[in-house]
Image: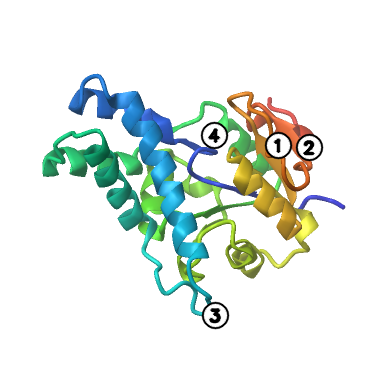
Amino acid sequence: MTIKAVVFDAYGTLFDVYSIGALAERLYPGHGATISTLWRDKQIEYTRLITMSDPHGAGGSRHYQSFWDITRLSLLYVLARLKLAPAEQSVDALMAQYGQLTPFPENLAVLEKLKAAGIQTAILSNGNTAMLEKVVASAGMAQLLDHVTSVDSARLFKTAPESYALVQQRLPLQAEEILFVSSNAWDALGATWFGFTTLWVNRQGLPFETIGVPPSFTGSDLGLVLEILQLKLD
């Protein structure tokens, strides 16, 4: 099956969520790396709790909160766990950094090549629309993405099938014609179960999940997208 579109996860795949550790270290010396790691873990845990904790219909989860709110609440939890003062100015600064996360170095070149080749590109993210617009603009990617889709309209976070189904509302293609790219193994697994062709970007050299089927492809950075589509960087 020919790949006709490439859909990227945002946080961890296009943007380095752990780059926020540098600012966290300046604000809370000696705790930057721990804050960034625990913050990410709690953020994902909360998305799963919300999506799994009640029977949901077409309106999504009754417990749904935006990813922005979840991200802030996760940070407050981590600061409390580490017994660090949740100074409003520090919390606001760390939250603002989510709009300026560092993109991985190969991203722009890969997106530019896909654009030049006429391949449709999109984001599907747990992030809400305002968050995504800020970080995409900050990274200079706004003109390189055809669609930026948030799970907000489904009110269910990944890996709920309803969240992945949002892709085909924007891109009316067969699931296997869409290459879904994520550096989060759980996301790559969920997308594979949904039926997408999948690429797990394993930047940290980790083993894949021991349940389910492996992704269609695995690589260490986004450059493999071009190899899969038989494109080459100039």
Determine whether the residue tagged by mark 2 lies in a helix, strand or loop: helix
Amino acid carrying mark 4 in the image: Leu
From the viewer's perspective, is the residue at label 2 or at label 3 nearer? 3
Any mark on residue 228, and which? 2
* Residue marked by disc 4: 108
Give the Cα distance between marks 2 and 4.
17 Å
Quick check: 158 left or right of 196?
left
From the viewer's perspective, is the residue at label 1 or at label 3 nearer? 3
Residue 162: image quadrant is bottom right
Determine whether the residue tagged by mark 3 lies in a helix, strand or loop: loop
Could you tell which of marks 2 and 3 lies nearer the N-terminus? 3
Q: Tell me, yes or no, whether the two marked residues, 3 and 4, touch with CB atoms within 8 Å.
A: no
Q: Tell me, yes or no, whether the two marked residues, 2 and 3, touch with CB atoms within 8 Å.
A: no
Residue 174: image quadrant is bottom right
* Residue marked by disc 1: 225
Could you tell which of marks 3 and 4 lies nearer the N-terminus? 3
| Residue 47 horizontal/vertical position (percent) | 45, 56
Relative height, residue 85 to residue 9 (above, below):
above
Determine whether the residue tagged by mark 1 lies in a helix, strand or loop: helix
Amino acid carrying mark 2 in the image: Ile
Closer to the camera, 231 or 178?
178
Circle 3: is it few (<14), some (14-19), or many (20+) Cα within 10 Å? few
